[in-house]
Image (tube, rainbow, N blue to C red):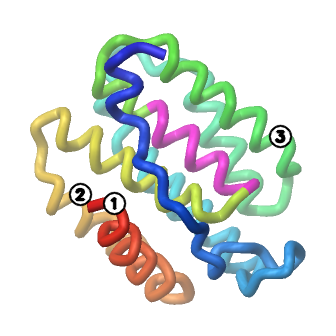
Amino acid sequence: MTDVQRKFQPKAVKMRDKRFIAEHRGGPLREEQHRLLIKWACCCAGNVLSLFGGEIDERLIHAIEIAERWGKGSVSVGEARKASVGAIAVANELSNTTSILVARSVGHAAATAHMADHSLIAAVYALKAVKQAGESVDAERKWQNNQLPPEISDLVLTARQEREKAIY
């Protein structure tokens, strides 16, 4: 891992937010909410794809497509995880900071199928990409928040606040 890549790794949050653990794993997150989270994460990642610079790597497009299909129930978690790994591989091959952040956003969007709280990380990487590109983080965060379906809005907004307190 290069210094640039290491610099943009998220700071570890000690405890998982249990609200993001799926019902089938003993948590409170309903399947419908999980699918809405991945849809939102794909929106966040997709919104910054234009910042990638140059031709967008096919693995990123594939990861978003697979994640969206998981959200509709037409692919397995394993397929989404594989697509996520492909997107993260793109990030690890790059040297352009903005492109790395975009690829990581996409990778975490797809990883949301496996663990719902990856949706938050996808949004964070999208914000970091916007900042690195010299665009308005506040405008992007507002846009992200406006994309939240009402069924998950409170969950995401409160989780974001709690994470920001823990990180900063």
Which residue corresponds to the image point at 23% horizontal and 57% vertical from the top-left? Answer: 140
Which region is colored magenta? 103-114
Asked if residue 111 lies in the magenta stretch, the reply is yes
N-terminal of the two: label 3 or label 1?
3
Q: Give amino acid for label 1.
A: Ile
- Residue named by callout 1: 167
Q: Amino acid at mark 2?
A: Glu
Please, is residue 83 above or below residue 154 in the view? Answer: above
Could you say whether the residue bearing mark 3 is in a helix, strand or loop? Answer: helix
Q: Secondary structure at mark 1?
A: helix
Q: Depth-wise, is mark 3 or mark 1 nearer the camera?
A: 1
Position in image of residue 123 (x %, y %) = 41, 55
Q: Residue 166: horizontal and vertical position, in percent?
A: 36, 67
Residue visible at 86% across and 43% down? 78
Residue placed furthest toward the front: 14
**Residue position marked by numbered label 2 in the rendering:** 140
Q: Nearer the viewer, residue 44 or 119?
A: 119
